[in-house]
Amino acid sequence: MSTGLARTSIRSRPSTFAGVVVALTFSATVISTCVAMLVTVGRMAEFPNKAEVTDLSAALTGGTGYLTILMAAVVASLAVNQRERETALLRAVGARPGQVRRMVVAEMLLCAAPSAVVGYALGSIAVRQWYRAMAAQGMVPADGQVSVGMLPLLVSFGVLGLTSVIGGLIAARRAARTRPAAAMARAAAPRDGMTWPRRVLAVVALAGSVALTVVAFFLPQETAYDLVPLLLLAYLVAVGAAGPFLGRLVTALTVPVSRLLGVTGELAVANNRARSRRMSAAIAPIAFASSFAVAKLGELYRDGRGLSDVEWLEIFGTGMYAGFAAVIAASTQVMLTMERLREVSLLRLVGVRRRRVVGMVVWESTIIAAGAVAIGAVVGTVVSVPMMAGGLPTVPAAGWFWITGSGVLVVVAAAVLPLLRLLTIRPIEGVAVRT
């Protein structure tokens, strides 16, 4: 029964689960690429940078696994929230909590299977390009042969299967435990504030992050470097939990500028306030990418010297994680935009022109993206202070440009492109759609 419901749910909401597939495919691509590089380098004779390439590939594989759990939980939760009414109806007609959980897990597994295959194919191409780029820099033997084999595919299936189950169970927890009557009421009038458990988690995570930062400040620099991933994770848990509050705060800070845009700016501010909880799904991944980039670039450029081959590998790893976060943010934005068909159609029926609707969404997305980059920059700077012996990280101007520009571009493009599709639907037909 659960598998059949999962298939029906995917067919009825293809745009929602397309975001899930894209995010899982990127994960499988990274995993396949890194595992293939591990296999390739492991079969080679010793060369100067063998240990560094092996360590980076292993670290990226492990880090991607952890991030995939986060990504699976985020996109699965968003997919569950988007069909809260349907889930409530299932509970009302007798579906048990266990059946709801199994349905969500089945949905994730049905998305994970093709994602693993496509990711393996893309990874087989990517690892060859990666190897050629490193060979051109003299970091690996130029005459080496890339070995792919079936191990990357098996690892991708294993990682995506496990993380999809974990992410699905996390996402289904609230929907499965809520009473049918309460779920129906919430679906009819959704609340967009922070729940008490979320507030407690945000406060505890922030307090723990500050305490860890103080401890790291009194440790030797090399030990402080090792704490950076833990510090970033702790702060970003706080950011994720406080996402709705941060979304409202960022929106409030942009009110003076929004007023200069007239009706477009006012609509954007009103929408961001009303949808702060869902829009916060895009804040955490962009904040993660910018904080990680600021911390890593600040570490690498702390002495104002050039970068070694190993440090270029670290830059590559930073870019990989940033790309992962960008895919999560883009997927959530696409899913959020596609559920706004009725809202967009209503605006058009009351006389709002298409150009103004597009401008509204662009400004909404810009506010969220710019705010997320700023939050991430603050987190990255705070985390870097113990490494700099109390100083601030030195990030090149080009680094700030790419961090800010890429974050804003990804979120805006992921919101506008599906919006253009919605604008092709006749308003009277869009209003009739129940989202």
Image (cartoon, helix red, strand yellow):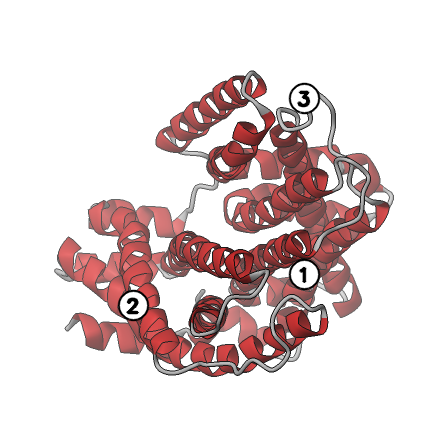
What residue is disc 1 on?
Answer: 410
What residue is disc 3 on?
Answer: 389
The mark lying in front, picked from 2 and 3, is: 3
Nearer the observer, 282 or 52: 52
Quarter of the figure with residue 260: top right
Can I make out residue 10 in this image? no
At label 3, the amino acid type is: Ala
Sequence-wise first label, 2 or 3:
2
What residue is disc 2 on?
Answer: 158
Query: Where residue 229 sits: x, y (%)?
Result: 51, 39
Disc 3, SS: loop
**Is residue 13 shown above or below 306?**
below
At label 2, the amino acid type is: Gly
Nearer the observer, 219 or 432: 219
In screen coordinates, is 228 left or right of 173?
right
Give how far apart the Cα atoms at labels 2 and 1 are.
29 Å
